[in-house]
Image (spheres, rainbow, N blue to C red):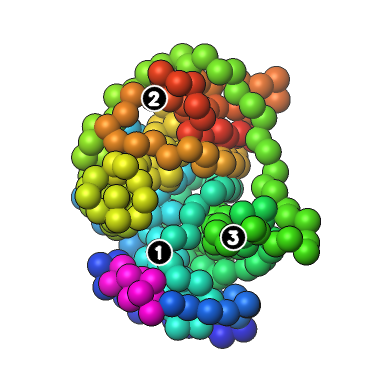
Amino acid sequence: MTVREITGTPKTAALYSRALLGAITGKKGTQLPDLELVMRNVKIDRAHLAAYNRICGFNQRETLPVTYPFVLAFPLHMEIITDAAFPFAAMGLVHIQNSIRQHRPVAASETLTIQVKPANLRPHDKGLQFDILTTLTSGDEVVWESVSTMLRRQGGGESAVKAERPAKTAAAPATPAVQWVVPADTGRRYGAASGDRNPIHMYAFTAKLFGFPRAIAHGMWTKARCLAALDGRLPDAYSVDVQFKLPVLLPARIGFRSDQQKDGGYTFSISDVKSGKPHLSGTIKV
């Protein structure tokens, strides 16, 4: 495996330019690169953390929200999927599932190391899927891990191989308990806080270039918003898995529902208030 040390946070604006170029020129390949990116001595920018907490609904405190390390790692994700050795164009990849395991709360004062690598290329009934594995360490201690499952659509899927579907999360009741109004600028505000300025999230006219009638909310914003709604009810260590379903077209009115399970975990979901169609379903295990 090639291990590449990253000495400074990659600039996502430049990486999106590279991603757009890859979409224009085309990329072909059949294997993921055997590559790991490592960024050491990562320190938390308190102003950045506060801005992230505001857009996602988390309380301001001295520990990181469970989804915040994803934002720290996102530039490394982009660095990998725009690498010359990566077989697929970055534009058009779809984030379909995300799992996070927090081993303990991470203090905003800690100095961290982030490791990111692609893995597990496999069939999906709509094409191919693969994982981006992320590990956060403090000293020699693993404090946080994530698996982001990405879909690369292909016509007809893998006809010769039975497609592997992501494990289904438990279905939450259809009737939402809370309604949220999601403004039209949510994608731009979250993009400013997260660095994820994919055109599909920014404006209606940029989203239309990629087949969406309006800008759509980031999947990781919807996950973060759900967990912010459960803030104060979750233990120090837990895992949270979500599947991203239909996109949230902005502006939107969405319904949130959560239900505690007998083992202390939760199921939760987001759906469209008018149609009841699902946007996200998730489970928390303690």
Mark 1 vs mark 2, CA separation in Å: 27 Å
Residue designated by label 1: 91
Position of the N terminus by quadrant:
bottom right
Q: Amino acid at mark 3?
A: Gly
Q: Amino acid at mark 1?
A: Met
Q: Position of residue 10 (x, y in %)?
A: 32, 72
In the picture, measured across the screen, residue 124 lies left or right of residue 80, that is: right
Residue designated by label 2: 254
Please name which of the two marks, 2 or 3, marks the residue nearer to the observer.
3
Residue designated by label 3: 155
In the picture, measured across the screen, residue 31 lies left or right of residue 225, that is: right
Mark 1 or mark 3: name the one nearer the start of the chain.
1
**Nearer to the camera, 112 or 12:** 12
Q: Position of residue 219 (x, y in %)?
A: 43, 44
Q: Quadrant of residue 160?
A: bottom right
The answer to whether mark 1 and mark 2 are in CB contact below 8 A is no
Residue at disc 1, secondary structure: loop
Q: Which dot marks residue 60? A: none
Mark 1 or mark 2: name the one nearer the start of the chain.
1
Q: Position of residue 170 (x, y in %)?
A: 67, 30
Instruction: Name the outermost residue toward the front.
Output: 156
- Write down the region rendered in magenta: 15-25
Compared to residue 237, the image places residue 10 above or below, namely: below
Mark 1 vs mark 3, CA separation in Å: 16 Å
